[in-house]
Amino acid sequence: MSIPRTTAVLASMALLVTACTADPVDTSSSANAKAPAAAIPQQQVDKALHDQLPEKIKSAGKIIAVNNGSFPPYVIVGTDKGAPVEGATADLSQAVSQLLGVQIEHTTVDGLASVLSGMQAKRYDLDMGPTGDFVERQKQATFIDYVQEYVVFAVHKGNPKGIDGLDTACGKRIAVQAAGSAEKVIKGQSAKCVAAGKPAVQVQSYKDQPSSILAVQSDRADAFFSSQAPLTYFVAQSGGKLELAGVGKGNGFEDLFQGALVPIGSPLADVLLAAIEKLHANGTYDAIMTKWGLEKNKLAKPGLNLGKS
């Protein structure tokens, strides 16, 4: 799988690696050169969709969107204040913005809890995600699902700890993103380990994806348990030092859908679903997913609240 390098994620990883490991990272202009951008079709404003937007958004000419940090290759947040968000989600967001005829302005906060509380306080209209869609989360937001995901492990090359699924995680140091679904699953597995007379999982919770993968790279963790798409990205960026493990297994999850989220009752849910359906029909969705190496995560048909577990 060919996955493009981006200046933003390399810069953030460089800062983190410098702080936590002795291995230097090449931050020269040649190392940070972006891969040629794939052609993403320009969208024409769909007047019918624009007219369905809430009056507040039409009057302002913008949608206030939020994200909870880097989630490559979907969301790549630059280290400089005000730096543009990049990645598959940013490309999808731009296409939706063009269809709706309004700007989508992005801001970054720490953690999903801040996203949800901010939407409930009406500070934000939308999170383009993708965020895991689970029944308990549907009580706090409406999901517009547009990708399917799988949860696996990123481990050191050669998998020296023999981690090949949840049942082999007992006694291992497993990094996860704090407050995410993977954290809940791995903590549940730790309880099962103890009940079976095995050592507990040493769960390490970090605020974001780069911090979590860096814990593995710096040998503070044996594995990072997370979504396959970002882990594939990080493995490709590791220079052969990491690999995936536990691929093709449920690892505590059934069908896992991810998508954008809006406040419950927001008319943006139906508008955004219709916009993404149009991007499916005209080939833009496929172009974006292919550009970012996400062909295996494509969802044949987007939908609302598809998560059932």
Image (cartoon, grey):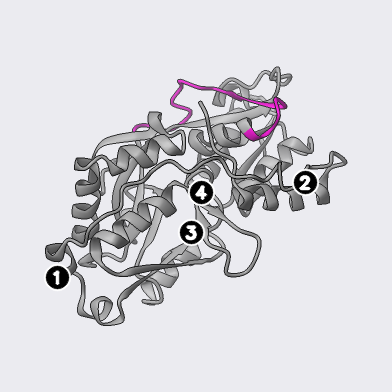
Mark 1 → mark 3, Cα distance in angstroms: 30 Å
Say left or right for 128 vs 46: right
Q: CA distance from mark 4 to mark 1?
A: 36 Å
Q: Residues within 10 Å of mark 1 (few under 14, many from 20)?
A: few
Q: Main secondary structure of the magenta part?
A: loop
Residue beneath label 4, please? 180
Indicate the secondary structure of the residue bearing disc 3. helix
Q: Residue at x 50, y 22 (%)?
A: 247
- Indicate which disc, 1 or 3, sits on the residue closer to the N terminus: 1
Quick check: is 162 in the magenta stretch? Answer: no
Foreground: disc 2 or disc 1: 1
Q: Nearer the viewer, mark 1 or mark 3?
A: 1
Q: Over which residues does the magenta segment extend?
A: 237-255
Sequence-wise, the earlier of marks 2 and 1 is: 2
At 34% from the left and 33% from the top, the residue drawn is: 255
- Image coordinates for residue 79, horizontal then vertical, percent: 65, 60
Q: Position of residue 108 (x, y in %)?
A: 53, 65
Q: Residue at x 55, y 26 (%)?
A: 166
Type of amino acid under label 1? Asp
Q: CA distance from mark 3 to mark 2?
A: 25 Å
Q: Are marks 3 and 4 in contact (CB under 8 Å)?
A: yes
Residue carrying label 2: 17
> Image height check: is 274 above or below 246?
below
Instruction: Work out whether mark 3 precedes mark 4 in sequence or the reverse, and give the earlier one.
Output: 3
The relative height of residue 152 versus residue 147 in the rendered view (above or below) is: above
Residue behind mark 3: 112
